[in-house]
């Protein structure tokens, strides 16, 4: 959530071995910056105050800083 530029994702990948992450941000500008780093497997421009469209049966862990 709030992917921003992808800096937190980079930290999680390098220091904790996390992979297979999806990005969500309300800002199309921030999502553009995150896409440039190619860190996520999927990108979603969405509002966290509204239902997030995920496939039924999928598990999701959220990280927000």
Image (cartoon, rainbow, N blue to C red):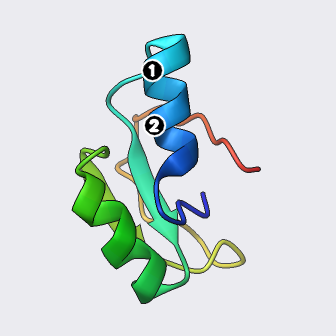
Looking at the image, residue 18 sits to the left or right of residue 47; the answer is: left
At x 37%, y 62%, the residue is: 34
Query: Percent position (x, y) of residue 45?
Result: 42, 78
Secondary structure type for disc 1: helix
How far is disc 1 from disc 2 in space, using C-alphas? 6 Å
Residue receiving disc 2? 10
Furthest residue toward bottom: 28
Height in image: 5 above or below 41?
below
Secondary structure type for disc 2: helix
Q: Which mark is residue 57?
A: none
At x 24%, y 45%, the residue is: 41
Query: Percent position (x, y) of residue 39?
Result: 30, 44
The answer to whether mark 1 and mark 2 are in CB contact below 8 A is yes
For the N terminus, give its image quadrant: bottom right
Residue receiving disc 1? 14
| Residue count near mark 1 (Cα–Cα under 10 Å), binned few <14, some 14–19, many ≥20 | few
């Amino acid at each position: 959530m709030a992917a921003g530029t992808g800096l937190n994702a980079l930290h999680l990948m390098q220091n904790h071995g996390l992979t297979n992450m999806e990005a969500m941000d309300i800002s199309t500008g921030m999502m553009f910056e995150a896409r440039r780093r190619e860190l996520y497997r999927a990108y979603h421009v969405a509002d966290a105050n509204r239902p997030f469209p995920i496939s039924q049966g999928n598990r999701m862990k959220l990280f927000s800083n």
